[in-house]
Amino acid sequence: MFNVLVCDDDIAILDSVEIYLKNEGYRTFRAVNGKQALEAVEKNEIHCIILDVMMPEMDGIATVLNLRKSSNIPVILLSAKSEDTDKIAGLSFGADDYVTKPFNPLELMARVKSQIRRFVNLGGIVEAESDKDNVLVTGGLLLDADANTCTVDGENVNLTATEFGILKYLMENMGKVIPADKIYENVWNEPSFASDKTVTVHIRRIREKIEINPKDPKYLKVVWGLGYKVEKI
Amino acid sequence: MDTKSKKFSYSITLKTICFLLSCLFTFIGTVSILSLGIDVYEKEAVYNDAMRSTDSKNLTSSYSFSEICKNHLSAIMLKSLYFKDGSLNTFKKVAKSVIDKEYNGTLNYCMSTDVDSLEDKSYATLTYLCDGYFEYASENPYKNSNDEVVKVPKGADRIYFSNGSIYSVKLDKKLMYEQVVENLSRNFYRQASENSKTLSKIKNLKYVIINNTDKTFYTNVETLNNKSTSEQIAEYFSSYGWNFHDNSSGKSSFGPDVFAQSSDRYESDYSAGIFGYYNILSTKVLVDTVEGAVQRYTADQYGYEISSADNYEIYAAFDENLSAEDEYFYIQMNIFSASRNILQFVVLFSICAVLVAASLIFLTVKAGRKEKGGEITLLPTDKVFSFLHLGFNFFVLLISYIIILILMKNYCSESVHIISKNISLAFSGLLAVVGYSAVVEWLMSFSRNVKNKSFFRHTLIGYIFFKKEPGTYEHKKNRRNLNIFILLCVGYSGALVFFALLTAWREMFFLPLIFLTLVGAAFLLVSAYYISKLIDHIGQPGEKPLDARLYPVWLRGFADYISKMQKNTNEAIESAVKDQKMKTQLITNVSHDLKTPLTAVINYADLLSKCDIDNEQARDYIAVISEKCDRLKKLIEDLTEAAKASSGNIRANIVSLNLNEIAVQVAGETEDALKAKSLELVLNVPDDPVFVSADGKLTYRILENLMSNVQKYAMPNSRVYLVVGNDKSVYVSNVSAKALNISPEELKARFVRGDESRTTEGSGLGLAIADDLCKIQNAALELSIDGDLFKATVRFETN
């Protein structure tokens, strides 16, 4: 039983998120502003915080800043601000994830689950396994080339051989932008055609499997007009 | 009714009627006064003709008239004294008696004897006989060698003189005598008949001549005869305004002083013009002593005195009333009728003049207004320079006047008339109407301008200095300064030309010419310097502000303008930037405020759908709520995006992109979605990579929007083409499911959708966003519709 703190000044949203969390089996704590949230964190053992950005008295950003002085509890920022700049600011101030309103409740739950998993159970494992050869890790994504397995936040992901090959190739060149034809040549060991969209289709499918929100990928990113890359986290 | 009539008095109809009537009056007035002039001229001609026929002498002087009277009277006396029956025989008798009386016995002798029978063949006698009939050259009588006078042979017709000179003489004494008498009598007769003829022309000269010797009575007064007493006669004559009586004693009964005075008056009255002619006749013309006149007349005429002059008595008077119908009567009649016409014409003319003047005043007062105190309506002609207008109208007036003058002059002084009298008059009348119209036109225009307070403005000076310019006071001032400047330039050019011409005439004028040229050059140089400074200022805004006071007078206004324009532009840019920021802020805030409640709605709708609800309908309702919530979410996102894109708040991160790559990526991303809609995607890229400078993310969003349009609107089971061209362009083409009755430009507008019913899921913002995003990264979105074929081309690096 994990404890999740939900902090939002909008009671209706607060209630609905609580319901979702309870349905998922979490124990919930609630706060309507940053100060209450900090108090709740002090008084209780909290495993994840869902934090609204725009709140009275103390907003989400300030709360994260204060929280990070003493704690590394995962924080998911929840905001109606959908600008890239807002996301970047929120993440760089110490938040672990950023979800824009209006959100898909299931997605939010998946993210909560992911954060708690990483925070409570699997952080150590990933770190431990990353030392092994042929194990490629970035964030919660782990690829074991020897075992031909791929896990995201500890959960196994079923990839086809081609998908596995593409992801492996990208993770081997982590952080680098690889054009589709180069991926093709390396994975298929054949020269590619300019208009061949095999690679891109595969990559979309990989994204759908490993990403919580494939349209807003965390690991496997599209660099438009140039290629693909796996972000090093 | 009252207001209606007031309005009517300003109506165009009334004005037109008034104008037409006044034209008619002008015509009538002109024709009447001109025909009066012609009439008077014609009467004068008749009168002159009459005067000329009365006597060869000019009758226009008092002297000649009194001369005529005297002559007439003396002729009457001649007649009365000598020729009682007026036949030629009587004249012969008188002539014989005159000759007899003059030469006494000598002539009688001469008459009764032949030269041959002359006892006294003296030289004196011969001389006398020959006198007047023969040449008599020799001064000395002819004597023969014996010193005796040579005898004239009997019947000889030659006289031989002893000194050798021979004179041929036809000595027919009877014939000679007859000839003398004949000549004399013919002279008498001719004179008398001429005088009688003349006398018949002046029947108003009343006279009574009584020959006291034989009591013969001559008169043209019917009531008097030789039985009348001298009292009756005197009474008759004294009833006339002027008269004269002289008897043989030489005593004037009625006094010649009266005549003398009258004569003087006549002379002064003549100058009174056509009415003066009457005075010629009514004046009591002096006939100075008729007796003397007769005596002088006969003596002058015949060389001898009328010894019996003391035997007559004369009464004479002139009938002022011209009761008898003689020459003078007719002249007077003419003049009377003329004067009667004058009155008619003058009255007609005066009436016309008054009416025309009244219409002029009416038209002038009512000009320009449609009702009392109403708006002034200016006609285009009113805006013509006033001096040009006045000049033109005056010219028209002058030309009409001159043509009338020429016509009239031709009629009066030339014997050959260009056109007939009536046509002349009518034509002159029309010309007068033309002239009158010019006057009316100008007066009405003047009146309108004065009422509109725009008269001065339409003068040349007013035009230059007070021309109504739209715009601010400042602008007007500058405009006026510019006008003055133009005037100065014109003046300067004029001066240059003037001095250039002077230089051509006299070389010494080259100095002022050079001076003027240098002044102009200096002016140009200064202007050029400051204008270049101004251009620098315009080209480098943001430098220190332009100070108009540093510029010369003639450029100050201009500089001021530019400085103000720069200031305004800067302000406009500042406020635009500020507005943009506020707009973006607003969009962000609004979308935030929309999203928060929407989040709650979506969450609860989702929760509700998970509730265990038995009611089928309720589950349907919840499904609808969820669906519409998603739609609303998408709309809000698109709206935010569109607002951001159109406000230019998105910054493009331009890098070198491979269009082939992005096309393949987009195809990969959207293929499944297309397949779900039974659409087949055909990707066509060139073999060589096509690199363009663009923002990858924005480009993807553009293509994504296009592809999402395709998903929404393409005909199911058709092919969709995604093609990259070597010309740095990429296009998407598909067959539309529904007919596209809309222009490509309209499609780009916000909230416009291909289907009018708007039932599909789109927001109508996709193409608008794509278009804006294209603009941000220097690309262009071109849409083309060919029937059902829809094609959207993104062209990169358009400039």
Image (cartoon, rainbow, N blue to C red):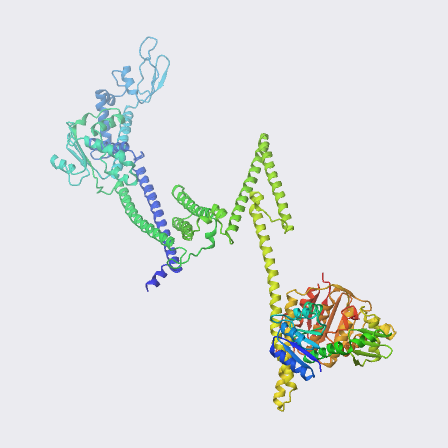
Picture quadrant of residue B172: top left
Furthest residue toward bottom: B614
Please identify the quarter of the rendering in which residue B725 is found: bottom right
Residue A159 lies, in percent from the top left, at 81, 80
Q: Quadrant of the C terminus of chain B?
A: bottom right
Using the image as rendered, state which of residue A105 and residue B581 is in the foreground: A105
The percent position of residue B203, horizontal first and vertical second, equals: 23, 39
Nearer to me, B430 or B588: B588
In the displayed structure, A126 sits above or below B27; it is: below
Residue A13, compared with residue B782, is above or below; it is: below
Instruction: Answer whether residue B312 is visible to the viewer in this image.
Output: yes
Give the answer, above or below, for where B237 lies relative to B302: below
Q: Is residue B531 left or right of residue B142?
A: right
Query: Which residue: 60% across, 58% down?
Result: B574
Q: Position of residue B319 (x, y in %)?
A: 20, 39
Judge whether residue B743 can be spotted in this image.
no
Residue A219 percent across, percent down from the top left: 77, 73
Residue placed furthest toward the top: B146
The residue at 19%/25% (across/down) is B307
